[in-house]
Amino acid sequence: MHKLLFLLIFFQSILGLAVSGLMQTAAAQGGTAAVQSQAWPTRPLRLVVPFNAGLTDTFGRVFAQFLGERLGQTVIVENRAGGGGVVGANAVARAPADGYTLLLASTSTWGQTAAEMRRLPYDPERDFTPVAALARGGNVIVVHPSVKASTLAELMTYARANPGRLRYCSAGIGSNAHFVGVLLAHRQRVELQHVPYKGGGAGVTDLLSGQIEMCVSGTPTGAPHVRAGALRALAVTSAARTPLMPEVPTMAEAGFADFVYGPLFGLLLPAAAPATVVARLQRESASLLREPAYKRRLVEIGAEETEPLIGEAFGRWMRNEAQRTRETAALAGMKDE
């Protein structure tokens, strides 16, 4: 009996020591994880920009500078262009979800590519965590000075009377500018001839020489030529007038209601990114959107402020935009590849 009691007490002691050891180990590991989480970031971050030269790249470098200052770490911009943003987005989707690889996403990488391609190598919703919207880009509808139209309404009257004779350029098939032309033609019941280029600058060059009549151009690309008098601007597709061309009306002011169309730039992380990292980047992004220096820099590069879409609000906006893009792609007669 005494031996049995002794053995029982002995085993209870051993069990207690084991449980205590496990609890201490778990506490130590939890403490280490907490310290690591609080310390993030401890090394430079990588911001993947899925395009080369243009407003997306320019904005990405501005954002990287501001974010790096807030985090106390360098944010390195890495251009991974190709496939309309697919190459860069896929690289981030497959990157380690440790909070050190970020994607500067746009309407193109989230919505347009999904509308144009049946089989993306990633799922825009499943493979990313939405962090925050950061800025907007704008478009301007410009014409060659030889075009006899001083307003967009007059241009549509001409297009209606001359089906298919009005050619407009864009940065390429499925680009944001292409879809502006598609929506405009659909809503106004006119026939416009789309002339796609590999990038917005090439199309504007042909417009300047009079080889085509009209372009839907990114605001930063078209604005210098408008200010120089080489092109005539009829309307901008942003919600408000742009400081780059304050005299140019919005689509609503030009008589075309419910026609806000332009890229939205935002920050995405791989889907399994640590919640503490996501929360930190959301806080920093929300704070950055209120910073006067950041707002001034947006104006300088031709970008625009955006409403504070953080986390799921940003994801919801992107999903809605993807749906609108799919509908516009259908109007354009684009088929899945």
Image: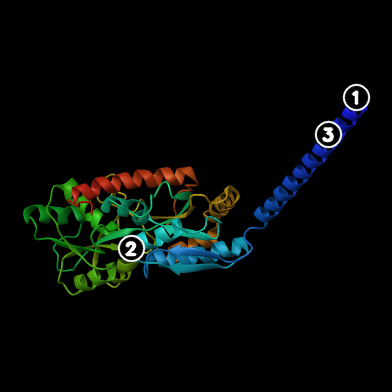
* Along the line of sight, the residue nearer the viewer: 235 or 206: 206
Q: Where does residue 218 sit, x and y in percent of width and height? A: 31, 63
**What residue is disc 3 on?**
12
Label 3 neighbour load within 10 Å: few <14, some 14-19, many 20+: few
Horizontal relation, residue 39 to residue 194: left or right: right
Query: Which-is-in-front pick, marks 3 and 2?
Result: 3
Q: In the image, what residue occupies the spot 93% across and 27% down? A: 2
Q: Quadrant of residue 152?
A: bottom left
Left or right of 156? Residue 94 is: right
Closer to us: 251 or 62: 62
Question: Which residue type does callout 2 highlight?
Answer: Thr
Q: Earlier in the sequence, mark 1 or mark 3?
A: 1
Q: Is residue 296 above or below residue 262?
A: below
Tell me the mark number nearer the camera, choosing from 1 and 3.
Answer: 1
Asked if disc 3 and disc 2 are in contact, CB closer than 8 Å, the reply is no
Q: Is residue 137 visible?
A: yes
Mark 1–mark 2 distance (CA, rounded to whole Å): 92 Å
Residue tagged 1: 1
Q: Are marks 1 and 3 in contact (CB under 8 Å)?
A: no
